[in-house]
């Protein structure tokens, strides 16, 4: 094969490689902010309601973890939650969604409030302090937001479900509601002792979701937490819980149920 033919083969091959296309809505933007509590920079994704620019309304805010998986197939690990696609369908009851990119190899460290003897971690309080003291003030100063706990939700899955639940228990003055999907309660069993010794405000709301195909401990650990919350006197309107037959530990499962959780948490 001469050089001309080789060149044509290379060009033909290159033309077959199509770069991944973003699936993020035009309502999604990104910025970078220093996170001194974590000694790093954080990429933040922000979804603004379609009528944000043409109104003077203030909006509730939902803080979500693992931003890479929320809006864009191009950056998602194994499919996206399609949060922006769902939010774009809403005519009313809109919110600002703030996605916080996970720290890659520091994800376990950031999303666990306690150290695990096998997986380490335990820097969750610093991560939440970053959200409370650095990110939230920036969001509230930059966008028209409802700043009180009643209108501030924190939401995630797996380790993100764990840290979201912990955030509402530990910092109810900041986070009034939590979306808790497939929570990894098993990695930090200390969370049960925290709940036992903490007074939970009557305004607090939790939406739980888990699937029966998420491992042996998922449903028992969730049911244990639900029983504990009930024993502490939480009312029926404070807890919504769904155990889905065949539900698996993946973005597809969480995407399918995001809308229902969102509507319940923000109604």
Image (cartoon, rainbow, N blue to C red):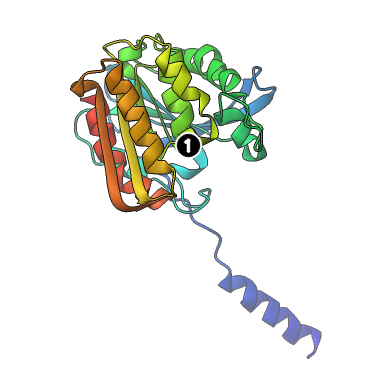
255 relative position to 94: left or right? right
Q: In the rendering, at what x and y percent does residue 60 appear?
A: 32, 20
> What residue sits 32% from the left and 45% below the top?
85
Q: Where is the N terminus found, in terms of image quarters?
A: bottom right
126 relative position to 213: left or right? right
Q: Residues within 10 Å of mark 1 (few under 14, many from 20)?
A: many
The relative height of residue 138 versus residue 154 in the rendered view (above or below) is: above
Who is closer to the viewer here, 223 or 27? 223
> What residue sits 46% from the left and 30% below the top?
162
| Residue 149 at least partly seen | yes
Residue picked out by circle 1: 184
Q: In the rendering, at what x and y percent does residue 67 appear?
A: 49, 37
Who is closer to the viewer here, 118 or 32? 118
The relative height of residue 67 versus residue 247 in the rendered view (above or below) is: above
Q: In the rendering, at what x and y percent does residue 91 appear?
A: 19, 34
Residue 239, quarter of picture: top left
108 relative position to 137: left or right? right
> What residue sits 57% from the left and 35% below the top?
102
Who is closer to the viewer here, 32 or 11? 32
Q: In the rendering, at what x and y percent does residue 98 appear?
A: 44, 28
């Amino acid at each position: 094969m001469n050089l001309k033919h080789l060149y044509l083969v290379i060009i033909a091959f290159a033309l077959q490689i199509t770069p991944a296309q973003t699936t993020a809505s035009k309502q999604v933007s990104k910025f970078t902010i220093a996170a001194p509590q974590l000694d790093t920079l954080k990429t933040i994704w922000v979804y603004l309601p379609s009528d944000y620019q043409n109104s003077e309304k203030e909006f509730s805010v939902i803080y979500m973890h693992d931003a890479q998986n929320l809006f864009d197939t191009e950056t998602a690990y194994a499919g996206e939650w399609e949060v922006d696609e769902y939010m774009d369908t809403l005519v009313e009851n809109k919110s600002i969604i703030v996605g916080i990119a996970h720290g890659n190899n520091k994800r376990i460290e950031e999303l666990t409030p306690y150290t695990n003897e096998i997986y380490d971690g335990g820097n969750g309080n610093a991560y939440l302090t970053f959200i409370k003291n650095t990110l939230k003030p920036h969001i509230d100063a930059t966008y028209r937001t409802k700043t009180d706990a009643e209108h501030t939700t924190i939401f995630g899955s797996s380790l993100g479900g764990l840290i979201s639940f912990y955030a509402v228990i530990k910092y109810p003055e900041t986070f009034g509601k939590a979306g808790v999907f497939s929570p990894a309660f098993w990695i930090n069993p200390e969370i049960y002792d925290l709940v036992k010794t903490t007074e939970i405000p009557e305004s607090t709301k939790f939406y739980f979701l888990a699937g029966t195909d998420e491992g042996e401990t998922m449903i028992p650990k969730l049911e244990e937490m639900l029983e504990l919350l009930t024993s502490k006197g939480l009312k029926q309107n404070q807890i919504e819980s769904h155990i889905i037959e065949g539900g698996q530990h993946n973005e597809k499962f969480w995407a399918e149920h995001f809308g229902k959780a969102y509507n319940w948490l923000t109604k």
